[in-house]
Image (cartoon, rainbow, N blue to C red):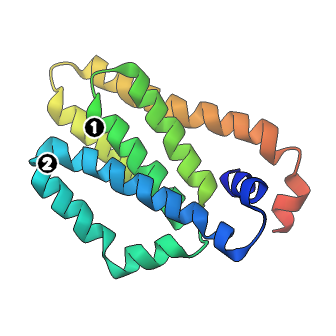
């Protein structure tokens, strides 16, 4: 939808098509700065984001119209939401929605998703050993965000266009 919006505003073209990964890579760098600054001081977080920003692979994937950068953005948004407010229920649900959006952007996220889910469950287990009910509630909310969004996608996107998707 963002590509469509860019085409609507600027017209179709190669430069406009490559604008979407640039936007997501900039948003990813900002998001990673906030995530890094929680664990290290702001100067080191800025250096880390700068080193990532000048990395050859990151720069190349930020310039070509593939769906890697949106997938990374939504995956790291899920990790950011899980990390920032691990005791709150709404960010866990929103992180599940973000994980499903990362899957719809690029299907290879299905290979990464189990690692996020298992890692989050272990994180909560070791952090909240005495509060297992609270940890299971957060994992359940995370999964409910994924399941609810996938159910809505199934009804609104997959079923109406099933023949086209299966032919692909």
User: Label 1's element?
Assistant: helix
Q: Is residue 80 above or below residue 161?
A: above
Q: Is residue 72 above or below residue 84?
A: below
Residue of label 2: 42
Q: Nearer the viewer, residue 119 or 83?
A: 83
Which residue corresponds to the image point at 44% horizontal and 61% vertical from the top-left?
25
Residue of label 1: 83
From the image, state whether disc 1 or disc 2 is nearer to you.
Answer: 2
- Near mark 1 (Cα within 10 A), the count class, few <14, some 14-19 or many ≥20, is some
Instruction: Give the percent coordinates (x, y) of residue 33.
Output: 26, 51
Which residue corresponds to the image point at 51% horizontal and 58% vertical from the top-left?
23
Mark 1 to mark 2 CA distance (whole Å): 17 Å
Instruction: Give the percent coordinates (x, y) of residue 123.
Output: 23, 39
Which residue corresponds to the image point at 48% horizontal and 49% vertical from the top-left?
74
- Near mark 2 (Cα within 10 A), the count class, few <14, some 14-19 or many ≥20, is some
Instruction: Give the percent coordinates (x, y) of residue 90.
Output: 43, 22
Instruction: Give the percent coordinates (x, y) of residue 151.
Output: 69, 35
Q: Nearer the viewer, residue 6 or 99?
A: 6
Q: Which mark is residue 94?
A: none
Q: Is residue 105 above or below residue 125?
A: below
Quadrant of the frame with the C terminus: bottom right
Q: Please indicate, yes or no, whether residue 140 appears anywhere in the rendered image.
A: no
């Amino acid at each position: 939808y963002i590509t469509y919006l860019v085409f609507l505003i600027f017209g179709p073209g190669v430069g406009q098509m490559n604008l979407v990964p640039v936007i997501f890579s900039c948003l990813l760098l900002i998001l990673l700065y906030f995530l890094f600054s929680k664990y290290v001081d702001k100067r080191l977080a800025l250096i880390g984001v700068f080193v990532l920003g000048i990395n050859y692979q990151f720069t190349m994937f930020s310039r070509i119209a593939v769906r890697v950068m949106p997938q990374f953005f939504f995956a790291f948004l899920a990790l950011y939401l899980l990390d920032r407010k691990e005791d709150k229920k709404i960010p866990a649900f929103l992180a599940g929605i973000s994980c499903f959006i990362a899957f719809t952007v690029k299907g290879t996220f299905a290979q990464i998703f189990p690692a996020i889910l298992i890692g989050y469950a272990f994180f909560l287990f070791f952090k909240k050993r005495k509060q297992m009910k609270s940890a299971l509630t957060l994992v359940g909310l995370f999964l409910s965000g994924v399941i609810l969004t996938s159910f809505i996608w199934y009804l609104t996107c997959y079923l109406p266009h099933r023949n086209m998707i299966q032919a692909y």
